[in-house]
Amino acid sequence: MSVKTKGEESGNSHRYQRLQNDLAQLINQTPPGSRLPAEPELAQKLGVSRATLREAMRTYEGQGLIRRRQGVGTFVVPQTKVIDSGLEVLESIETRARRIGLNVSMGALQITEIMADVEIAETMHIKEGTHLVQVSRVIHAGNRPVAYLVDILPKNALLEEDLTSGFTGSVLDMMLKRGSPRLAKSFTDIQAVAASQEIARKLEIQRGDVLLSFVARLYGESGEVVDYSSSYFLPGYFHFHVVRRVENPISF
């Protein structure tokens, strides 16, 4: 087994940084909407392997600067507004986008009936095998898919009239507009995850690309879970932050 010396690691880091700088310069010089050279040509031009090139390109795809389409090529993305939002208040993508004048739209909507497995039953505090409704959809900013949302709801929480009265993709907005159930709080787990094959296909990215994942339980006033959701965001199109207060130091 070979062991890299500090000098070798430093050299590799320097070469990778130079590769990223070269890519950044190429992206900046390419008109938005235009295609970059094919991977074999670009890897040869930059003097790196295709695997190393793909790894470096993931950084810029995550930033929303380029878009790779399987079998078609890599394109420079026209810059759009970033959805910048605090996390202190629960809001839909549509509400956040409307605040900055960004037009977002819902892609194909899938509504399926499922039965609670062990994990879902434990999370929603219901019996295993309970009939539920799953609502899945992709959210677009312009012509680019930027988020994939999946909500799991009690079967009676989604009515036919909800879907025929201007449903734009937000279950939260639907509930707030309807006024029931009355909502109390949301508990959300946030982490970076690698895109699965299914999600990568829906967001038109590569499997394994990094996404922001929000897994949330939305509670009604009576303490019941009214929505169990999983949301996946392309990092380059979203910027989330948290405002935290500073506690006064304790005097001893």
Image (spheres, rainbow, N blue to C red):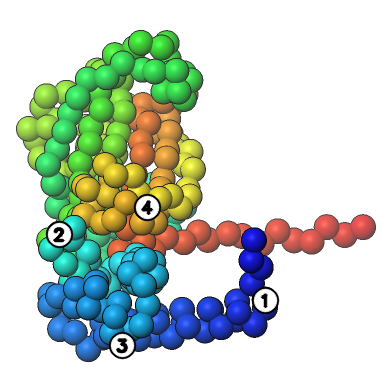
Examine the image and state in which quarter residue 221 appears: top left
> Looking at the image, is 134 positioned above or below residue 245?
above
Q: Nearer the viewer, mark 2 or mark 1?
A: 1
Number of other residues with Cα within 10 Å of mark 4, as a class: few under 14, some 14 to 19, many 20 or more: some
Number of other residues with Cα within 10 Å of mark 1, as a class: few under 14, some 14 to 19, many 20 or more: few
Between discs 4 and 3, the one toward the N terminus: 3
Indicate the quadrant containing the N terminus: top left, top right, bottom left or bottom right: bottom right
What residue does disc 2 label? 71
User: Which type of secondary structure does the marked residue at label 3 adopt?
Assistant: helix
Between discs 1 and 3, the one toward the N terminus: 1
Give the residue type at disc 1. Answer: Thr
Q: Are marks 2 and 1 in contact (CB under 8 Å)?
A: no
Identify the residue at image location x=34%, y=44%. Answer: 196
Label ID, residue 25: 3
> Looking at the image, is 203 positioned above or below residue 155?
below
Q: Nearer the viewer, residue 64 or 91?
A: 64
Give the residue type at disc 4. Answer: Gly
Give the residue type at disc 3. Answer: Gln
Residue 67: x %, y % from top left:
22, 66
User: Which type of secondary structure does the marked residue at label 2 adopt?
Assistant: loop
Q: Nearer the viewer, residue 150 or 47?
A: 47
Label ID, residue 22: none
Between discs 2 and 1, the one toward the N terminus: 1
Q: Nearer the viewer, mark 4 or mark 2?
A: 2
What residue does disc 1 label? 5
User: Is 145 placed left or right of 82 in the picture?
Assistant: left
Q: Are marks 4 and 3 in contact (CB under 8 Å)?
A: no
